Amino acid sequence: MRNKLKQNYLLIILIIVQTIIYIIAGSYKQYLHIDEAYSYGLTNYERIEIQDNEDFYNNWHKKEYYNDYLTIQEDERGKYKPIYENQKNDVHPPLYYLILRIAMGFTDSQFSKWTGIGVNIIIYAFITIFMYLILRKLLKEEEKPKEKAVILAFMSSVTLASISNAIYIRMYALSALNILITTFLHIKLLEQNKPSKKILVGIGTSALFGVLTHYYYLFYLVVLYIIFAVKYIKQKEIKILINYTLTMAIAGITSLIIFPYSIQHMFFGYRGQGVISKFGNIQEILGSIYPNIYNLNYYAFNNLMYIIVVIVVALLIYNKVRKHNKNYINSDSREILKIIFVPSLIFFIIAGLASPWQVLRYIVPVCGLIFVVVMYYLYKLLKTITSQKMSDVIICVVFCLTLIMPIAFKMEPELLYVDNKEIVQKLSGELNLPTIYMYHFDGGCFLEDIFLFSKIEESYIAKEIEYTEENIQEIVKDKDISNGIVIFITEGRNDEEILQVIKNVTKLNKSEHLKKLNTCNVYYVR
């Protein structure tokens, strides 16, 4: 009883520590990625794009106009229809947006990054708990298995990948949790000769939540299903296979009853069609693998993966040449490893291929599992050539290096946008002046910068206008520009030519480049 309390206290303490780490990282987050803006907008706005408003372009707007897209206004409280309607017309299922909408209800019509980050921090507490439960099963033959499971679970939650996922306001943290719950329940299923109704109901429920969170979850679930279906066929457990299959079928049918638009999204939407077209292209397949291996190394292993993998391969070769004990991993652990690693690997490959861009967020739901599997193999192989105590010491050193690497080499979580801090402070403070965005569709999307426009007192989005003195004069008439004006220009334009026309009209004679944002340049004309 005392040992159990000790383990629970350790788990709670480490979850508190990881929460503090996430809060610190979140406090440094200075900007929103375009998809994070969508996360907020799709939970409450009457349409997917604020740009679809008839009055959006070529009109002056106050900051409240843009803030309305990112927040729940007083008259919108209790109205949940936009969640469903917007997801129907977009490319994702609705569960995450419902959860975020509930969290946004606790703010008073003011935008806060902490609603989204807070949801993810809570989700990651459960991620660490379920990772611990999985590792406790995997490490049960080890000395002090529960303590080691707690520490390894914590380590998987404080890599750059996990920190990035915790502060990225999208559904990927929830998807990671769905995958871990599904994996844990399948490990429980593996342990039962005759599956209990409780476990099957749990698997069906987790599958339902998983597919209503993100369609990529199916890449993982389908592989798990195949593994267990093959197992039951080999063992001639046809009745169990039928019950297991019915569980998955009921979950699938229920998800379609709740959100029938999934079929359209997965097979006929532009994302689905894009995925299908890639599978026959070898060049696309190969081109997607390397960037994601880079992301896995940099974020999931804090730049140590290549070194660790080389050590693991060297130890495998050494063991084979020396003909050491081949059963350094027992049969139960091998089965658990199979249902963890095989679906994770397939998910990593297919999700990377299916994604429109090779970036961390698409593979992050399995980064934690891949991390713990590699670390587990390293630990088990070390024990074949050295003592238990020495293996523990070496693993502790590896863990310490994993923690130190981001600090020593100034590695940052993805999409932290620390370098945008100054421009946000300037344009919401001393340079909160009338702002014009010379906007072109071919250069970017307005939602890339809606966060900044929700802080600027008044602004004008000039949609693909001719840069004539007459047009500029019409835009700035009746505006107080005695202290200057801020200009955004979509990339790919002749900035100097546009700025010169603005100077001619406003009688301002100096321009200062303030910042290169993702899809535009920002200037102060005075």
Image (tube, rainbow, N blue to C red):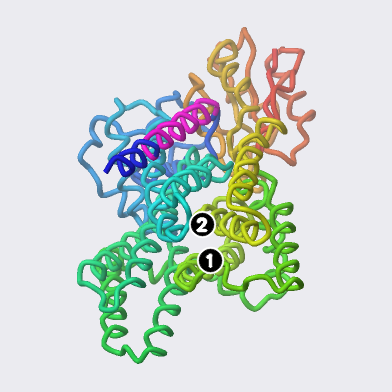
Identify the residue at image location x=36%, y=50%.
96
Image spot of residue 76 (x, y percent): 25, 36
Q: Nearer the viewer, residue 485 or 250?
A: 250
Q: Nearer the viewer, residue 507 or 400?
A: 400
**SS class, disc 1:** helix
Q: Earlier in the sequence, mark 2 or mark 1?
A: 1
Query: Which disc is residue 341 wearing?
Result: 1
Identify the residue at image location x=51%, y=21%.
456
Judged left or right of residue 56, residue 349 is right
Image spot of residue 436 (x, y percent): 60, 26
Q: Is residue 525 magenta?
A: no
For label 2, the residue is 369
**Type of the residue with mark 1:** Phe
Image spot of residue 455 (x, y percent): 49, 23
Query: Which disc is residue 354 wearing?
Result: none
Q: Is residue 124 above or below residue 509?
A: below
**Type of the residue with mark 2:** Leu
Image spot of residue 524 (x, y percent): 68, 18
- CB within 8 Å, label 2 to label 1: yes
